[in-house]
Amino acid sequence: MKKSLHNFLKFTNFELERLSKFLFALMGITFIANLVGYIYTPMKYMGKINEYIAQNSATSEQAIQQYGPFSFYNALNSFWIVGPIALGISGFIFYSFFIWYREWFGKNTFAYRLLMLPIHRMTLFYSKLVVVFIGIFTLISTQMISLFIGYPIVSAIIENTYYVNQSLMEAVQLHPLFLYLFPLDLGFFLTINAVGLVVLLVLFTAILMERSYAVKGIVLGIIYAVVALTLVLLPLFLPDLLNNHYILYGSELIIIEAILLVIVAVLSLFTSRHLINKKITV
């Protein structure tokens, strides 16, 4: 047990070192883009206000009627904030593939050397899984820190006459995207992360299918991913699909979703274990 834990920590640290450059690049892009948004978006708004007043000899009230007041939510809803989040999500989807396929790049395939090490092969699987989640939560933490930096910047740029005195938490709660990223509702946050974990397990399983069966594995992987993800996500969209939001109570939906998540997660783990131990040979 102690040796297995040591191997797991060693490989997790190894994967973290390989992730670091990619992660630091995403963190830098997120922080810089956010900072630009916290400055540029309110300054652009104030520029429109001042131009409107100067050209039309208008009052502040008339300018507010024309452009509306400004709140921190307006800054959060800009491309400079939403864009890096979309980039981070797509980046880690790409990295979830890359973390496996880079092992097979080149003539002297590094994957074979890894698989020949005297350790449980699933240690490699678990270390890659954990590293992806560490990267995701690190990027989310960067986004959260930037909010605390951006809030006073925005309130300092916008004149009090045009600024809606909205707390940081109120602005974040209004934005639907942050409901998925931050633990604003603990139950919902845990459910979303559980879904994310299962999606990642399914993705890893599909990749191992492709590595095990080549072209046939691509078809098997796609079929498995579609069936598994449909099974997991269907209860979340069932009320909208049936146009009946009272078909399930919230507690019933959580129980059903939890059962399906566990089934798909266990199936993915057992399938991955079989593939990496029996089908991927060196």
Image (tube, rainbow, N blue to C red):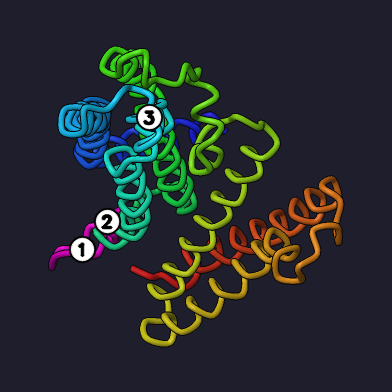
Inspect the image, locate mark 3, and give the three-letter code of the amino acid beneath it: Ile
According to the picture, the residue beneath numbered tag 1 turns out to be: 109
Inspect the image, locate mark 2, and give the three-letter code of the amino acid beneath it: Arg
According to the picture, the residue beneath numbered tag 3 turns out to be: 64
Q: Residue furthest front?
A: 57
Give the x, y percent position of residue 244. 80, 64
Dots 1, 3 in contact, CB < 8 A: no
| Residue for point 16% across, 33% down | 55
Numbered mark located on residue 113 in the image: 2
Q: Which residues are magenta?
A: 103-114
Give the x, y percent position of residue 269. 59, 58
The image quadrant where one finds the N terminus is: top right
Q: Nearer the viewer, mark 2 or mark 3?
A: 3
Ranked by sequence position, the earlier of labels 1 and 3 is: 3
Inspect the image, locate mark 1, and give the three-letter code of the amino acid beneath it: Thr
As measured in the structure, the alpha-carbon distance from the residue carrying label 2 to the one carrying label 3 is 66 Å
How crowded is the residue under tag 3: few (<14 C-alpha within 10 Å), some, or many (20+)?
A: some
Observer-nearest residue: 254 or 159? 159
Observer-nearest residue: 118 or 184? 184
| Residue for point 55% across, 49% down | 197
**Residue 267 sits in quarter:** bottom right
How crowded is the residue under tag 2: few (<14 C-alpha within 10 Å), some, or many (20+)?
A: few
As measured in the structure, the alpha-carbon distance from the residue carrying label 1 to the one carrying label 3 is 63 Å
Dots 2, 1 in contact, CB < 8 A: yes
How crowded is the residue under tag 1: few (<14 C-alpha within 10 Å), some, or many (20+)?
A: few
